Image: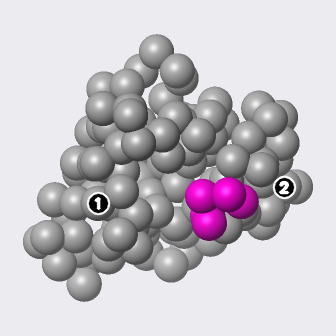
Amino acid sequence: MKKVAIIVHATENEGGRVSHALLYGQELHGANFDVKIYFDGQGTTWVKTLEDPSHMFNPLYKAAKGLGLIAGVCNFCANVFGVTEDAKSAGLPTFADVEGHLSISKLIADDYQIITL
């Protein structure tokens, strides 16, 4: 089975990137890929936005989350952008493998292809 890690770095003005990360994740999952979506950098701020039921991307996010595609949030970045509690409230794990950040080398060692949006 092929593995894909989608890392969301999208800023608050890049909703297209976020929606496509969620769409691509679901498409790949439907094609039997092992998919993980991570929120990293300023992309961590999207968790609070996507958890809002009134946001237009909430159904897309909830579907991806329901499929188990949302792997988590960078711990360091969540702290920097003040969204650690939002990630916890959303039930998402935080990753602090390399000086508080997500480990890209670990994903590559585990044979994940990386997509960054």
Left or right: residue 32 compared with residue 105: left
**Which residue reaches farthest front?**
54
Residue at image point 79% right, 62% down: 96
Circles 1 and 2, Cβ within 8 Å, touching? The answer is no
* Residue 89 horizontal/vertical position (percent): 68, 57
* Residue 77 horizontal/vertical position (percent): 75, 41
Q: Does any portion of residue 93 appear in the rendered image?
A: yes
- Examine the rendered structure and indicate whether residue 78 appears above or below residue 93: above
Identify the magenta region. 88-92
Residue type pointed to by label 2: Gly
Q: Does any portion of residue 102 appear in the rendered image?
A: no
> Which label number is shown at residue 63?
1
> Which label number is shown at residue 100?
2
Q: Secondary structure at mark 2?
A: loop
Q: Is 89 included in the stretch rendered in magenta?
A: yes
* Residue 76 horizontal/vertical position (percent): 82, 47
* Residue 57 horizontal/vertical position (percent): 32, 37
**Which residue reaches farthest right?**
99
Residue 35 figure quarter: bottom left
Q: Quadrant of the C terminus?
A: top left
**Which residue reaches farthest top?**
13
Graded by Cα atoms within 10 Å as few (under 14), some (14 to 19) or many (20 or more), the crowding at tag 1 reads some
> Which label number is shown at residue 106?
none
Graded by Cα atoms within 10 Å as few (under 14), some (14 to 19) or many (20 or more), the crowding at tag 2 reads some
Residue 88 or residue 28, whichever sits in front: 88
Residue at image point 52% right, 35% down: 49
Dominant secondary structure, magenta: loop
Residue 82 or residue 27, whichever sits in front: 82
